[in-house]
Amino acid sequence: MSWFPIVIADRCDGCKGEFKCVSFCPNGVFEARDGKAWVVKPMACVPGCTSCAMLCPREAIIFPTERPMKATASSLGVRDKGLLRKVRCKGCGKFFWTNVEGAEYCFSCRRKMSLRRMMSEGASG
Ligand code: SF4
Ligand code: SF4
Ligand SMILES: [Zn+2]
């Protein structure tokens, strides 16, 4: 597996000029351009290292392990990728991607909850 970060450009705000990942990465993987961080030396990244993602205040840096989920989100037709966030579901505890503000439950938990609600409404009414 080739290991290097991807910056979700719409999320990166350059740390308001601080460019934390750019100054942090000892291998010069990032460069600041037009107010955002760009991956300019992907092959200089150390396999398994995710330090820069940890310090990114915007959660704009993702790694190969997270890419399949993002691909799923985009294949589901999420339109505004800039607002995509990774959230831990309060129901099942799994991580999911969402662009819904304040979303707390993954799609399958929400579906289960609405089914349950429909059934109880059906029973009482
Ligand atoms: S740390 Fe995150 S927000 Fe800051 S420059 Fe890097 S990618 Fe952009
Ligand atoms: S994971 Fe480590 S080596 Fe790779 S870009 Fe981030 S800080 Fe640099
Ligand atoms: Zn869930």
Image (tube, rainbow, N blue to C red):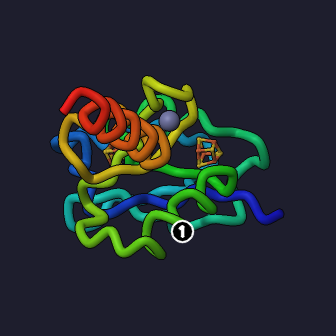
Displayed-image quarter of ligand 2: top right
Quadrant of image for the N terminus? bottom right
Residue at (65, 58) in percent of width and height = 4
Residue at (54, 68) in percent of width and height = 71
Which quarter of the picture shows residue 123? top left
**Count of residue discs:** 1
- The residue wearing badge 1 is 71
Question: Percent from the top left, x then y, of residue 42?
Answer: 63, 65
Question: Percent from the top left, x then y, of residue 116?
Answer: 39, 34
Viewer-proximal residue among 88 and 4:
88
Q: Is residue 67 left or right of residue 43?
A: left
Residue at (57, 57) in percent of width and height = 69
Viewer-proximal residue among 53 and 33:
53
Quadrant of image for the C terminus? top left
Question: Percent from the top left, x then y, of residue 108?
Answer: 49, 46
Viewer-proximal residue among 97 and 7:
97
Viewer-proximal residue among 114 and 107:
114
Badge 1: how crowded within 10 Å, few (<14), some, or many (20+)? few
Q: Is residue 111 left or right of residue 100?
A: right
Dot 1 beta carbon under 8 Å from ligand 3: no
Which quarter of the picture shows residue 94? top right
What element does badge 1 sit on?
Answer: helix
Q: Amino acid at mark 1?
A: Ala
Tell me: residue 77, above or below residue 20. Answer: below
Residue at (26, 72) in percent of width and height = 79
Question: Percent from the top left, x then y, of residue 72?
Answer: 53, 66
Q: Is residue 4 left or right of residue 124?
A: right
Which quarter of the picture shows residue 77? bottom left
Tell me: residue 62, above or below residue 72. Answer: above
Q: Is residue 40 left or right of residue 41?
A: left
